[in-house]
Image (cartoon, rainbow, N blue to C red):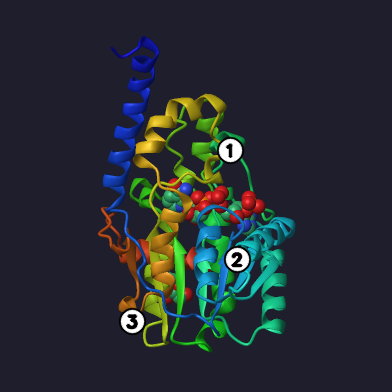
Amino acid sequence: MISAPALYAALPISVLVAIGFIRKWRSRNWGKCVSNTCLRGKTFLITGANSGIGLETAKALVRRKARVIFACRDITKAKEAINAIRKEQPSGGELIPMQLDLASFESIENFVEVIKAGFHKIDVLINNAGVVVPLSQDEKTKEGFEIHFGVNHLGHFYLTNLLLDHLKRASPSRIVVVSSTLHERAKLDFNDLNLRAEIEKAKQGRVSQRHNLGYCNSKLMNAYFVRALADRLRDSGIDVHACCPGFCYTNLFRNSVRWYHYILMFPVVLLFMRSAKQGSETVVYCASDYSIEGRSGKFYRDCAEYNSKYPFNKEEEIKLWNISEELIKARKPL
Ligand SMILES: NC(=O)c1ccc[n+]([C@@H]2O[C@H](COP(=O)([O-])OP(=O)(O)OC[C@H]3O[C@@H](n4cnc5c(N)ncnc54)[C@H](OP(=O)(O)O)[C@@H]3O)[C@@H](O)[C@H]2O)c1
Ligand SMILES: *[C@@H]1O[C@H](CO)[C@@H](O)[C@H](O)[C@H]1NC(C)=O
């Protein structure tokens, strides 16, 4: 006879085991970067390398002896991350902490000055940092741009353009932009890139909490930036790749997740969400796999090319480029 307590225990255990198997089965489609060539002598610059996908990307590259610059908003967090990695792999590549706040043009400019003084070339720039903030909080960058537009797009747009000479010097070199398939839900209004209308609606509680237009738009701008830049850099020896890491549990949702979401989301997390390490695979692939060298301007997911459902068009692409340049010159929303 099986005792009653054993039966009570058997049910949740078998559910967990079943979920474990389903997760394992699903994860076989998530892709793995098989490239493991030594990266000694190569310099990688990762924005937001102290947390989540950026941190796991840094770990993977350091394991292959790369030199990695941690461009982080909070230098203490950068140093803590570096110390933790050094403990894990004392014989890995060189790790360098640096301060960069993408929500401030001045910080970006100072950062680039220091890079230019200290490094001769950058082999791979990984634009990974990103934020998700509920629109109702109406958060802005130092220059007054809507936070997703300002940090996820404009800040990286400016940083990348300032670093192009350093990337050219390392060619064949790469720029990897961490976008998201959520770009497919974007709706760009060039008369309101700072989303004043949407923010007003959000403040009145008239928009869905789950659909953050600011974030989706910024991820579309990432994808457009890659396409435009790849065009401009044709035959320069610099490849530009966009990628989506997949849906991962990281700190990204810290501003929008409440405690009860963790309970409600638990099954979703187990079944659908990747670890930051699993998410980093496609980023590492785009940053280091030789098989895609020379194939610039594409979008990747699950370590394979991804066909976006967004109807990209050249006019929108150029318009966004032009406006971004103008706004950086103006140093304020127009
Ligand atoms: N997680 C997902 O499901 C998912 C899905 C698709 C795409 N992505 C993309 O993946 C990228 C990495 O996100 P994650 O999931 O790893 O999130 P995360 O753990 O929150 O990491 C984001 C990083 O960006 C940094 N950052 C934020 N604002 C910054 C600023 N103003 N200046 C400099 N750095 C700043 C953060 O620094 P602090 O630690 O100091 O805040 C952190 O290091 C993002 O671009 C995100 O859009 C994520
Ligand atoms: C973008 O800027 C270029 C150069 O200033 C200009 O020739 C072009 O017409 C602009 N295109 C759009 C769509 O704004």
Question: From the viewer's perspective, is residue 74 above or below residue 99?
Answer: above
Q: Please tell me the numbered disc located at residue 2.
A: none
Residue identifier under label 2:
328
Residue identifier under label 1:
255
Question: From the viewer's perspective, is residue 87 above or below residue 39?
Answer: above
Please tell me which of labels 3 and 1 falls first in the chain: 1
Q: Nearer the viewer, residue 18 or 217?
A: 18
Please tell me which of labels 2 and 1 falls first in the chain: 1
Please tell me which of labels 3 and 2 falls first in the chain: 3
Q: Nearer the viewer, residue 167 or 315?
A: 167
Q: CA distance from mark 2 to mark 1?
A: 27 Å
Residue at x 40% of width, y 13% of height: 5
Position of residue 75 in the picture relative to residue 319 (left or right): right
Which image quadrant is residue 118 in? bottom right
Kind of element beneath mark 1: loop
Circle 1 packing at 10 Å, graded few (<14), some (14-19), many (20+), is few
Q: Position of residue 112 (x, y in %)?
A: 67, 75
Kind of element beneath mark 3: loop
Q: Amino acid at mark 1?
A: Asn
Q: Amino acid at mark 2?
A: Ile
Position of residue 26 in the picture relative to residue 174 (left or right): left
Mark 2 C-beta to ligand 2 under 8 Å:
no
Q: Amino acid at mark 3?
A: Gly
Q: Position of residue 252 (x, y in %)?
A: 53, 45
Q: Quadrant of the N terminus?
A: top left
Residue identifier under label 3:
294
